Image: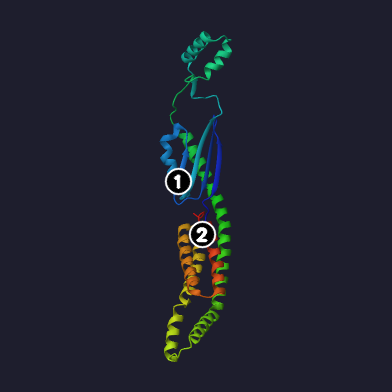
């Protein structure tokens, strides 16, 4: 089972005087890249919240937002009366206007409100932790569902690669015969007397360089290993990436040894399928 690194989770909880909202978004990244937006009241808890998120999401470019909205009568902001009165006095000195209009202007000016720093409410923080837990569960469900889509795509492409490998196996004997015929014709065109035994030895040595038996066996093993890793209990994106590199290495070697146009065309198709796997692999956790 694999997971995508793309996901979204959101949960809202209503307290007597506050509404707490947590949103988590993630995209693909080589490592965990966590950007957190947290109210200043809870800055001292940021590391703890980050550890919780890292323990659940592991990798990805993650945006985490904690939003706290006052819905009751309690507020941490108060009118700074002395400052506001001073503003009104100054405004009256430079412009005419009724007191209500001058008050509206004064309230928009700096320091018209004073905010007292709140201490952390432990019960409220427990609610935040619970909200975060649910949001993480939601994003992991999202990631798992996206992972199933990727898994189906990988499975189909591995099957295609195995089918193309069977085509390579099927044309291998004809390929060797064609190469042998081409070499014999080249020697005959020289119109020189050649020692038949020596020529046969050299031909066998030459054809051995084009033998792809080992590459075919290793490629099939890598494809099977990819499938078994895909079906393991953990999401092994990095491991699957390494296996993909080994698959590519064997395909490239077959292509370089082919020396036979029909087989090289099949190799191009194999490379195309593998490239699509590698593109999608960037999203796997």
Q: Position of residue 38 (x, y in %)?
A: 47, 36
The residue at 46%/63% (across/down) is: 245
Q: Find out whether the residues at labels 1 and 2 contact each other: C-beta distance under 8 Å.
A: no
Lateral position of residue 83 relative to residue 262, left or right: left
Real-space CA distance between mark 1 and mark 2, rounded to the nearest whole angstrom? 21 Å
Mark 2 residue element: helix
As rendered, which of 202 and 169 lies closer to the eye? 202
Q: Residue at x 55, y 55 (%)?
A: 147
Where residue 105 appears, x then y in whole percent?
Answer: 55, 17
Which residue is nearer to you in this view: 57 or 15?
57
Mark 2 lies on residue:
278
Residue 32 against residue 271 in the figure, above or below: above
| Secondary structure at numbered mark 1 | strand
Query: In the displayed structure, would residue 117 be above or below residue 268?
Result: above
* In front: label 1 or label 2: 2
User: How packed is label 2: few (under 14 Cα within 10 Å), some, or many (20 or more)?
Assistant: some
The residue under the point 48% across, 47% down is: 61
Residue 76 disc label: none
Along the viewing direction, whichever of 203 and 124 lies nearer the viewer:
203
Image x and y of residue 261, in percent: 55, 74
Residue pointed to by mark 1 = 33
Identify the mark nearer the N-term, 1 or 2.
Answer: 1
Q: Position of residue 168 (x, y in %)?
A: 54, 74
């Amino acid at each position: 089972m694999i997971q995508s690194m793309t996901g979204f989770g959101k949960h809202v909880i209503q307290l007597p005087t506050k509404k707490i909202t947590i949103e988590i978004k993630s995209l693909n990244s080589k490592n965990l890249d966590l950007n957190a937006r947290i109210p200043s009241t809870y800055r001292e808890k940021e590391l703890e919240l980050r550890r919780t998120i890292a323990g659940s999401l592991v990798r990805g470019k993650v945006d985490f937002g904690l939003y706290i909205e006052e819905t009751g009568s309690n507020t941490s902001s108060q009118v700074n009366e002395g400052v506001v009165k001073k503003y009104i006095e100054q405004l009256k000195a430079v412009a005419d206007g009724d007191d209500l209009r001058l008050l509206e202007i004064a309230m928009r000016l700096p320091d018209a409100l004073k905010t007292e720093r709140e201490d952390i409410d432990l019960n409220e923080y427990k609610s935040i932790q619970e909200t975060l837990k649910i949001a993480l569960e939601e994003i992991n469900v999202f990631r798992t569902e996206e992972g199933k889509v990727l898994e189906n795509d990988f499975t189909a492409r591995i099957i295609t690669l195995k089918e193309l490998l069977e085509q390579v196996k099927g044309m291998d004997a004809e390929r060797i015969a064609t190469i042998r015929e081409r070499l014999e014709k080249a020697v005959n065109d020289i119109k020189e007397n050649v020692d038949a035994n020596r020529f046969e030895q050299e031909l066998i040595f030459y054809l051995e360089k084009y033998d792809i038996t080992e590459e075919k066996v290793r490629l099939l093993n890598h494809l099977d290993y990819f499938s078994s890793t895909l079906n393991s209990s953990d999401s092994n994106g990095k491991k699957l990436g390494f296996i993909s590199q080994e698959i590519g290495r064997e395909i490239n070697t077959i292509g370089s040894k082919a020396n036979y146009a029909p087989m090289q065309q099949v190799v191009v198709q194999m490379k195309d399928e593998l490239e699509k796997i590698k593109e999608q692999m960037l999203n796997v956790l």
